[in-house]
Amino acid sequence: MPNEIELVLGCQRKDPRAQAAFYNLYKGRLLGICRRYARTVMEAEDIFQEAFIKVFNKIQDLQKPESVEYWVKSLVIRTAIDHYRQNTNERQFVDYHLLEDTSNTDISAISQLGHEEIVAVINELSDGYRMVVNMYLIDGYEHNEIAKILGISEGTSKSQLSRAKVHLRKKLIEMGVTV
């Protein structure tokens, strides 16, 4: 089996076997990312398909094949965010200046749950909360990056995360998870 760099080079040559192998290599991981950002499995699959079209259309631009995993993951996340923007009738981000400090809310209790349970709990959040939770806690973006990508203030990103943690904590307690 070719390594990732060989697959990228094959995809850049538009080799169908390399494209199929590349697709199969990343399908599970990337579909998982899409599931976190989407409300439904069908929506996640739509985002995934749209993202993979972009991957194959833009793979020619990838200068460093060794960074393909980061590049593909970023492209999928941006596609999910674009999908969210296109399908949101109203902005759900509200800037709360005087938000109580819940920065110490321990959400490590989520590790007690299985993958499907985690996705289900996160999907119960409002779209705004869900986007920030995914970007900050799971994908490792900083608040200034989230603000720029989503077109909100850094304070709004922080408040959305804080409020999402409160909702997650309540849900975990309801599920009997020790928080």
Image (cartoon, rainbow, N blue to C red):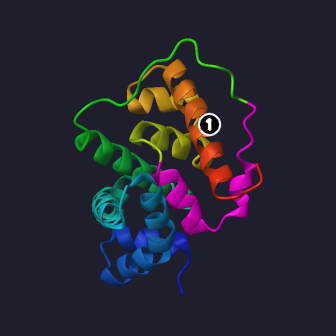
In the rendering, at what x and y percent does residue 21 appear? 43, 81
The answer to whether any part of residue 63 appears in the image is no
Front in this rendered view, residue 174 or 66: 174
**Residue 105 part of the magenta-drawn span:** yes
The answer to whether any part of residue 32 appears in the image is yes
Quadrant (top left, top right, bottom left, bottom right) of the N terminus: bottom right
Q: Main secondary structure of the magenta part?
A: helix
In the rendering, at what x and y percent does residue 132 appear? 51, 38
**Residue 97 part of the magenta-drawn span:** no
In the rendering, at what x and y percent does residue 56 appear? 31, 64
The secondary element bearing badge 1 is classed as helix
The residue that appears at 46% across and 42% down in the rendered structure is 131
Front in this rendered view, residue 166 or 161: 166
The residue that appears at 33% across and 64% down in the rendered structure is 52
Examine the rendered structure and indicate whether residue 118 appears above or below residue 114.
above
Front in this rendered view, residue 33 or 117: 117
Front in this rendered view, residue 176 or 132: 176
When asked about the image quadrant of residue 95, the answer is: top left
> In the image, which residues are magenta?
104-124
The residue that appears at 29% across and 39% down in the rendered structure is 85
Label 1 crowd (10 A; few <14 / some 14-19 / many >=20): some
Examine the rendered structure and indicate whether residue 62 appears above or below residue 102.
below
In the rendering, at what x and y percent does residue 118 appear? 58, 60
Q: Tag 1: residue type?
A: Val
Residue tagged 1: 166
- Residue 165 shown left or right of residue 150 in the figure: right
Examine the rendered structure and indicate whether residue 19 appears above or below residue 167.
below
Q: How many marks?
A: 1
